[in-house]
Image (tube, helix red, strand yellow):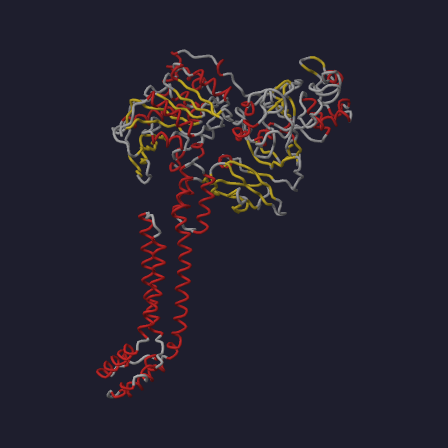
Amino acid sequence: MHLHINHSTYFKYMTSFVGASIAIVETSNIIDHQLHLEFPLVEVALVGLLITFIIGLFITYRNQKTPDRIKEKIKNKFEKWSATQSVQFKLNTTELLNANLFPELLSENNFDKFIEISKQNNSDGGAINKLLPILNILLLVGFFGAGIFFYVKLGKASNTIEKELPEFLQLIKEGKSGAAYYAGKKILDNDPNNKVVIDGLKTITTAVDLTTVTSNIDVFLLLSQEDDRWEFIGKTPLNKKSLPNGNLKLKFVDASKHEFIINVGTLNLEIGENNFELPVTMPDTTTMALVIGTNASIRLPGLDSRPRVMFSPFLIDKTEVTNIEYKKFIDAGGYNNPDFWSIPTLLNGKPFNFNLAQKLFVDKTGFEGPSSWSNGTYPEGKANFPVSGISWYEADAYAKFVKKKLPTVYQWAYAATPLKSASMCPSSNFSKSETKEVPYSKIKSGFGLSDVAGNVREWCSNATKDDLAERAILGGGYEDDSYTFNNYFGQDALNRSSSNGMRLVEDLTNNNLQQYAETIKMPTRNFLKIPKISKEIFEIYKRQFDYEPAPLDIKILKTDNSDPDYTYELIEYNAAYNNERMSGVLFKPKNFSGRLPAIINYPTALSIYASDISEVTLGQFQKTLLKLGHAIFCPIYKGTYNRRDELKSYYPAKTDFYKDHVIMWGKDMKRSIDVIESRTDLDLSNLMYFGFSWGGEISNIMIPIEPRIKRAILIVAGYAFDESKPEVEAASYTPFIKVPVLMLNGKYDYIFPSETSQKPMFELIGTNKNDKYWYLHESSHTVPLDEFTKKVKIFLDKYSKPAGK
């Protein structure tokens, strides 16, 4: 006996099984990731479905091949047809073929007629019946293919949910914007509509403009150094392009496919240092580093508040000029050729000339050459050591000999990248013993310059006095302390110290000529010598910040409990001036009860360049204070976030505009403390001031004007070098700080140098010496989080009341 296969039975089985499988897998997926089960529920469900499918397929085959079952199905249809004469009960093609296998059915009344009608109706739909085997095969292949595809996709989704997404969110939490941006982009490659990632990226990016002197330049962002992965971000000019916060590496590709790579900070782009000029051709960068043109300020304390200047592309030596290179100048008669020398006609008010200069520029034995040489040559074995013991005039003459220039202060400070001082300085030659062979330092500047910190001081073209008697000399030498790398210094142009050397630049255009001749005066102030004011004068100054009591009219605009560690409240209230309303954000730690000790926060300068109140977020230092049981109130000060006005910088200035803003900032802080005082959930009795960077600098004024402040933690604080009007001179207020103070700073701070800015501030703080603390760390404009945590715990244990658990 031969039985024919019923393809419609398989089709019905597989379609119903696919529907059930989708429901089971989706349910398993939801349960797995909602309950975070420790065993792979979805994978088990997939394997179980596969086994069930195979068993079901076998049972279906067995059932539809059973003669008695087939006979019963045919007989049932015949009986229903006999009772109704309806074509609804016709036999399908397979049943027609199998009907002939059961001759006893032929004895039934009218069975032949039933067969004929079934044949007739099957002939009408024969095409579909013929397609059923093909449909079954396609469905079977599709089922297994979909299972494999879903399994792979599910694996990727599980990896995203269980590993990649938590890592992405953790990087955001740790403030590692660049790494988080890269991690987020990787997730979006496989899941472009992932809302968690899209929203997370918004919190770590800033929308910036970016232009080039020649437009239509391709711009790429380095996503990962490990796999050299670049992301195309558009053609210049770029408007409101979201880039990760922090230091970026960008690549410009011009029409000739020349590639130019730069390091730049998102903040620099945001504040306007965002226009770039590329070289016309690709220069030789074997011994010199290429710096593309841009509009930048001088990145040295006290000079960084000067207006930005556009400089064109240039090359700068990767290493300092060496003894053997300088010897070529002497051997070529350079010391006797007046064409190379820029000798003044007057020196210190007395006549001077080239012949007199020649008598000064001799070595230890009277031969022509640097002061560190003997017998007209460098010490044995030091051919590749930096030339040292030269005056500015000698350095300038050598530059003319090799057809180069001494760098401008703008060029040197930009190429040296002081913001990398924390990594460069510890490995640089500040040995106080002797110079080292170049290249010595393992850590290079952002443009690949070796020994730009230490080894020898490097002469620059700019004068530091109007009479041109002093010239800028930067970077610090082996005899100096490491903090000198970040400071601006000038020396007598005739100075031939054994620490004086040079590195040179080569202009790629003639657009920088005016900058070489500019006099850039020393900005450093001796804060310890600023005349102190009396207590009576201080009380008069302090009255500037007074205001008449008035209703706060507090409104809670928004609350958010979604973060596992803290609650968020956006609060609006009346300011103390001009009938204005202002806002503040209150962060309260969870898992603490009772009245929480309060902290009044003062933001960093980033707040001046932000535009939306949603950008008020907590840094790692503040989150640590939350974990220690403190509530943090972050006022929106005048000129910041959604209260932005014409304020462009936090730098002090001798203007009424700056003075008026300081007064408004003081009133904003005091008014915000009024809000804290109005709340029953916050404890004002031990109020703490927290300031980071700008918040540390302005603390000199904010703390002494508010008696409700009982203690202060200041991170990377110091004095700004720019002067202001006497009524708001920070150094005048500092002696009237009387509360316990913890100052945590970086030894290589490129904004507030340790010796000339941090140290004077600490010494002038009027707090009892046993209640003020200053710690220097091996860092720049930040401090290590673990060191912060340890020092803060000790400070809080001594100067705070414990929060209620």
Q: Residue 478 appears at what percent x and percent y?
A: 60, 22
Residue at horizontal 67 percent and vertical 26 percent from the top: 385
Front-most of residues 400 and 741: 741
Residue at horizontal 21 percent and vertical 83 percent from the top: 83
- Total number of numbered discs in the rendering: 0
Q: Residue 533 appears at what percent x and percent y?
A: 43, 12
Q: Quadrant of residue 327?
A: top right
Instruction: Give the left or right position of residue 308, taking residue 551 as reference.
Output: right
Instruction: Give the left or right position of residue 522, taking residue 657 as reference.
Output: right
Residue 192 in the image: above or below residue 374:
below
Quadrant in which the N terminus is drawn: bottom left
Residue 722 in the image: above or below residue 166:
above
Residue 380 in the image: above or below residue 11:
above
Front-most of residues 782 and 149: 149
Instruction: Give the left or right position of residue 313, taking residue 81 as reference.
Output: right
Quadrant in which the C terminus is drawn: top left
Q: Residue 427 appears at what percent x and percent y?
A: 56, 28
Front-most of residues 618 and 93: 93
Q: Quadrant of residue 554?
A: top left
Q: Residue 423 appears at what percent x and percent y?
A: 53, 30
| Furthest-front residue in this view | 1
Front-most of residues 486 and 404: 486
Residue 180 in the image: above or below residue 672:
below
